[in-house]
Image: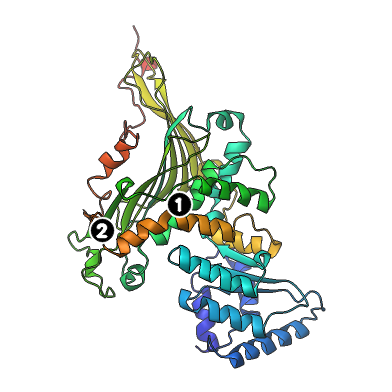
């Protein structure tokens, strides 16, 4: 690319704030002036040496002193070149005159063996505290809020266990399909693309024990302990699906970039896993993710047990919902007497919607937050090597079954724009979730008592 083409490419999606456009335009122009593009080949030392010379020239022009020549390398690249690029950087651009930080974008391998190989090769080149395996879900506002909800509130802290919670669902829904990315997606599938990383990371935060401090390693230690308590996913605890066309919406196999027109790669998956420890024994954690569904949504839903000896037998279970996106929110579904002369019990909610409560506060993009963490040398929201290994061990046997098209692997079809396979409701019900009062609305009385005299 030419320099101008590069600048246009990296700035075209930068949004200017309302009422701050003029100030933001000035900042954007300043950003462009210090943003540069050096072309080179992944596997040629000469390219990295050109990069090093350019970096040193910039450092000298800016008067950067020895000991402060800090460098961050961000590898958002095809996984096949992670290792050669890391080797080229270490041989030619690594510095001992400041800190070095290497950001690695997923996927971190395709299974346990490939992930361990990547970790081993990177470990030979960079120290673990120099490596930042980035999962952008850990930078999302509501994911980072899970620890505050759990450990800063007595109410939630005491109810956060198998005594009160019947099941947990972590859901990821996209309203669009692969849209020309079928060739890439077919190599990974929805489990590798979303569940093994994003949703499993959210699960560890929901399920982990209280860390001894907010130090990065203390938090990551507890996340690893949770993963060690989860056995590999069994095929009978899995529902797999692939979307088909609906009207003018094409099916997965209609994607022109897809090479294997007989592909059995799942575009939808629901898996149930169990954490075998004192807090969570017997509580199913249901992880669901899919493309070409009916809406865009990511949420955590904790459904509580029914009230024992309930006076109001038809009342629904309580649910605590953490909506990660869109429109960040935390709300509790609870039962209440319908106002007025009726004694009917209705379901309503205690609702903290961020766009209503925090109107003057801007929520940063996940990557914005995580890159700032890198600059601060904070590993709290990044994946450690042993954490990654344990995560892959949970899913690798299932993934190999799917890859090998074993006889007990069944792919259900679902329509583009639907909620997923029709078997989904029975699947979650099997693990204890009851979709009660799914379409409840705020109550509206027919008569205003104040306007009517006896």
Q: Is residue 128 left or right of 179 when viewed as pictured? A: right
- x then y, percent, for residue 269: 33, 53
Tag shown at residue 199? 1
Q: Is residue 10 left or right of 99 when viewed as pictured? A: left
Residue 59 lies in quadrant:
bottom right
For the residue pair 305 and 68, the one nearer the viewer reads as 305
Q: Residue at x 57, y 70 (%)?
A: 120
Q: Secondary structure at mark 1?
A: helix
Q: Kindly identify which residue carries mark 2.
A: 242
Q: Is residue 94 left or right of 449 when viewed as pictured? A: right
Please rate how many residues cluster around mark 1, counting C-alpha atoms within 10 Å: few if below 14, some from 14 to 19, many from 20. Answer: many
Vertical placement of residue 309 versus 82, above or below: above
- What colour-coding does the image apply? rainbow
Q: Residue at x 45, y 52 (%)?
A: 199
Q: Secondary structure at mark 2?
A: strand
Vertical placement of residue 347 versus 452, above or below: below
Q: Residue at x 43, y 36 (%)?
A: 283
Please rate how many residues cluster around mark 2, counting C-alpha atoms within 10 Å: few if below 14, some from 14 to 19, many from 20. Answer: many
For the residue pair 115 and 64, the one nearer the viewer reads as 115
């Amino acid at each position: 690319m030419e320099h101008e083409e590069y600048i246009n490419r990296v700035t075209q999606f930068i949004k200017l704030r309302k009422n701050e456009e003029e100030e933001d335009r000035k900042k954007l122009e300043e950003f462009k002036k210090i943003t540069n593009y050096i072309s080179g080949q992944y596997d040629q030392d000469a390219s990295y040496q050109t990069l090093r010379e350019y970096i040193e020239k910039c450092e000298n022009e800016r008067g950067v002193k020895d000991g402060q020549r800090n460098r961050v390398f961000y590898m958002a690249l095809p996984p096949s070149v992670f290792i050669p690029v890391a080797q080229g950087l270490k041989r030619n651009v690594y510095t001992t005159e400041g800190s070095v930080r290497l950001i690695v974008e997923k996927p971190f391998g395709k299974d346990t063996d490939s992930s361990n190989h990547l970790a081993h090769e990177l470990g030979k080149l960079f120290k673990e505290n120099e490596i930042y395996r980035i999962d952008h879900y850990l930078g999302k506002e509501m994911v980072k809020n899970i620890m505050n909800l759990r450990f800063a509130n007595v109410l939630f802290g005491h109810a956060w266990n198998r005594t009160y919670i019947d099941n947990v669902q972590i859901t990821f829904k996209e309203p669009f399909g692969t849209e020309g990315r079928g060739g890439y997606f077919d190599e990974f599938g929805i489990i590798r693309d979303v569940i093994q990383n994003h949703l499993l990371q959210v699960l560890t935060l929901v399920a982990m024990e209280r860390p001894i401090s907010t130090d990065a390693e203390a938090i990551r230690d507890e996340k690893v302990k949770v993963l060690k308590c989860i056995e590999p996913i069994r095929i009978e605890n899995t529902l797999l699906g692939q979307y088909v066309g609906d009207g003018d919406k094409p099916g997965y196999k209609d994607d022109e970039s897809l090479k294997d027109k007989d592909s059995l790669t799942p575009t939808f998956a629901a898996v149930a896993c169990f954490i075998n420890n004192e807090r969570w024994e017997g509580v199913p954690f249901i992880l669901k993710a899919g493309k070409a569904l009916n809406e865009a949504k990511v949420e955590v839903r904790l459904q509580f047990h029914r009230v024992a000896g309930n006076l109001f037998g038809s009342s629904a279970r309580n649910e605590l919902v953490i909506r990660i996106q869109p429109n960040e929110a935390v709300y509790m579904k609870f039962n209440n007497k319908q106002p007025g002369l009726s004694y009917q019990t209705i379901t309503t909610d205690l609702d903290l919607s961020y766009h209503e409560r925090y109107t003057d506060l801007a929520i940063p993009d996940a990557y914005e937050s995580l890159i700032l963490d890198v600059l601060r040398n904070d590993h709290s929201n990044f994946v450690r090597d042993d954490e990654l290994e344990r995560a892959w061990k949970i899913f690798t046997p299932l993934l190999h079954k799917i890859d090998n098209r074993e006889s007990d692997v069944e792919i259900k079809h679902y329509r583009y724009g639907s909620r997923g396979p029709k078997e989904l409701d029975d699947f979650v019900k099997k693990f204890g979730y009851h979709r009660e009062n799914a379409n409840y609305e705020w109550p509206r009385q027919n008569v205003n008592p104040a306007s009517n005299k006896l």
